[in-house]
């Protein structure tokens, strides 16, 4: 139903606020007794060490994953020493393990030791994941030869180890069944590495982090890579892998989708993230889908028309200092599938962006469940002529944040 906000009673407004608070609190409270038991076990992990029998030897893969997630979420408050955490994680690794997601709190040497443990005790592992992409001075040992002993391996995330061309050759030779790969490539990565990647016929999902995007000055093997060369490497990786369906690289922009559209007009590809700025002089390619789109300041009328003509469903949309009259028009055209909306403010020129009409936003984005804006301020209005009588509250009930 619609609520008249001008005439709504204090009691009616209070009920809506209470409902929102209950939803937020429900997210923070453990969902079940199982969650409480997992957290209790982690908190008292020392008591399980040194026992004659491993209490977790028959733990199923699904519960092992939940333990890993809970360890990462709770250890900041529990402050478990690294060596104790390593011993406890070792107890969780049993023959039921299928997906190993390394706890980010472990050191490089502990990670390598766990890989060896998996080789000897977990023959059914198909996924090795290490979500760690920041660069440090610490040398990261890549247990590539060890990982290749896992005959069923189909998905690898190498985290922060910078791969070179030779590493991709080894992957082609020893892990032919890979369907998902996440890597950080060093500045020694060249077209030869792209050639090896093009031979990975089963690869469908590729995440690439380039050392130059992470401030590669911390790496010992730094070379300066020209911007044009880096762009071409990204485009060729996306285009030459025969069955690639999903591609993620930080910093993809107009230049990427322009070159990709020219070189590979018939290859269907999904980009996780894309940033659009001025000079969108290429019609949006029908073979390209993007899930997260950022629209930046400085659009011309031609650029604006190109954005409004995007045909693929956008799930997450960010506006960076875009005038709100343009925001309204863009949302009306492409907002139907948007679930997350974020407004940044990096307006270096002090432009007057106007007022964001909240009624227009929620009508243009019926599936919206997350709405963010930066603390520096967002001018919101309910109606352009300030005569709004009703606000469709149903559209807010799905909002999570």
Image (cartoon, rainbow, N blue to C red):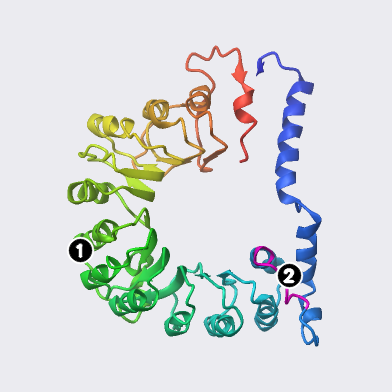
- Classify 10 Å Cα crowding around label 1: few (below 14), some (14-19), many (20 and above): few
Residue where numbered disc 1 is placed:
229
Q: Residue 14 location in percent, x, y? A: 76, 27
User: Does 141 sit left or right of 242 as displayed?
Assistant: right
Q: Secondary structure at mark 2?
A: helix
Residue sitting at x 52%, y 81%? 108
Q: Secondary structure at mark 1?
A: helix
Residue 347 visible from this viewpoint: no
Residue span colored magenta: 55-63
Residue sitting at x 78%, y 87%? 50
Please state the total of marks drawn on the protein image. Answer: 2
Q: Residue 320 location in percent, x, y? A: 40, 41
- Classify 10 Å Cα crowding around label 2: few (below 14), some (14-19), many (20 and above): few
Question: Which label's residue is closer to the chain start, 2 or 1?
Answer: 2
- Checking the image for residue 78, the label placed there is 2
Residue sitting at x 54%, y 21%? 382
Residue sitting at x 57%, y 83%? 110
For residue 183, which quarter of the picture?
Answer: bottom left
Q: Main secondary structure of the magenta part?
A: loop
User: Does 41 sit left or right of 349 as displayed?
Assistant: right
Task: Look at the picture and state if 55 lies above or below 251.
Answer: below
Q: Inspect the magenta stretch and tell me whether residue 298 lies in it.
A: no
User: Does 155 sit left or right of 75 as displayed?
Assistant: left
């Amino acid at each position: 139903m619609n609520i008249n906000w001008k005439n709504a009673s204090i009691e009616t407004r209070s009920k809506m606020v209470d409902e929102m608070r209950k939803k937020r609190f429900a997210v923070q409270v453990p969902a079940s007794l199982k969650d409480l038991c997992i957290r209790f076990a982690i908190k008292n992990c020392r008591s399980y060490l040194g026992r004659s029998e491993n209490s977790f030897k028959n733990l199923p893969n699904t519960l092992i994953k939940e333990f890993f997630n809970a360890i990462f979420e709770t250890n900041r408050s529990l402050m478990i020493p690294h060596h104790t955490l390593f011993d406890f994680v070792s107890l969780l690794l049993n023959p039921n393990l299928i997906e190993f997601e390394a706890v980010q709190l472990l050191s490089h040497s502990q990670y390598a030791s766990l890989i060896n443990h998996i080789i000897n005790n977990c023959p059914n592992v198909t996924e090795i994941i290490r979500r760690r992409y920041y660069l440090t001075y610490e040398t990261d040992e890549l247990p590539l030869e060890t990982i290749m002993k896992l005959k069923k391996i189909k998905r690898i995330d190498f985290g922060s180890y910078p791969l070179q061309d030779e590493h991709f050759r080894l992957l082609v030779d020893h892990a032919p069944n890979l369907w998902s790969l996440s890597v950080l490539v060093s500045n020694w990565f060249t077209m030869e590495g792209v050639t090896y990647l093009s031979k990975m016929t089963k690869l469908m999902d590729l995440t690439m982090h380039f050392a130059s995007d992470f401030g590669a000055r911390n790496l010992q093997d730094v070379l300066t890579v020209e911007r044009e060369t880096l762009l071409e490497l990204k485009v060729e990786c996306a285009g030459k892998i025969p069955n690639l369906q999903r591609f993620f690289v930080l910093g993809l922009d107009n230049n990427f989708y322009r070159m990709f559209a020219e070189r590979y007009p018939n290859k269907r590809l999904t980009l996780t993230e894309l940033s659009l700025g001025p000079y969108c002089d290429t019609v949006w390619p029908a073979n390209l889908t993007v899930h997260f789109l950022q629209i930046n300041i400085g659009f011309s009328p031609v650029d604006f028309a190109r954005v409004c003509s995007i045909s693929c469903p956008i799930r997450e949309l960010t506006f960076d200092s875009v005038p709100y009259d343009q925001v309204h028009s863009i949302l009306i055209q492409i907002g139907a599938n948007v679930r997350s909306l974020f407004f940044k403010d990096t307006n270096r020129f002090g432009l007057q962006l106007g007022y964001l009409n909240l009624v227009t936003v929620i009508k243009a984005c019926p599936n919206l469940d997350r709405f963010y804006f930066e603390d520096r301020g967002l001018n919101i209005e309910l109606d352009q002529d300030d005569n709004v009588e009703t606000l469709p509250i149903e559209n807010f009930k799905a909002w999570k944040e």
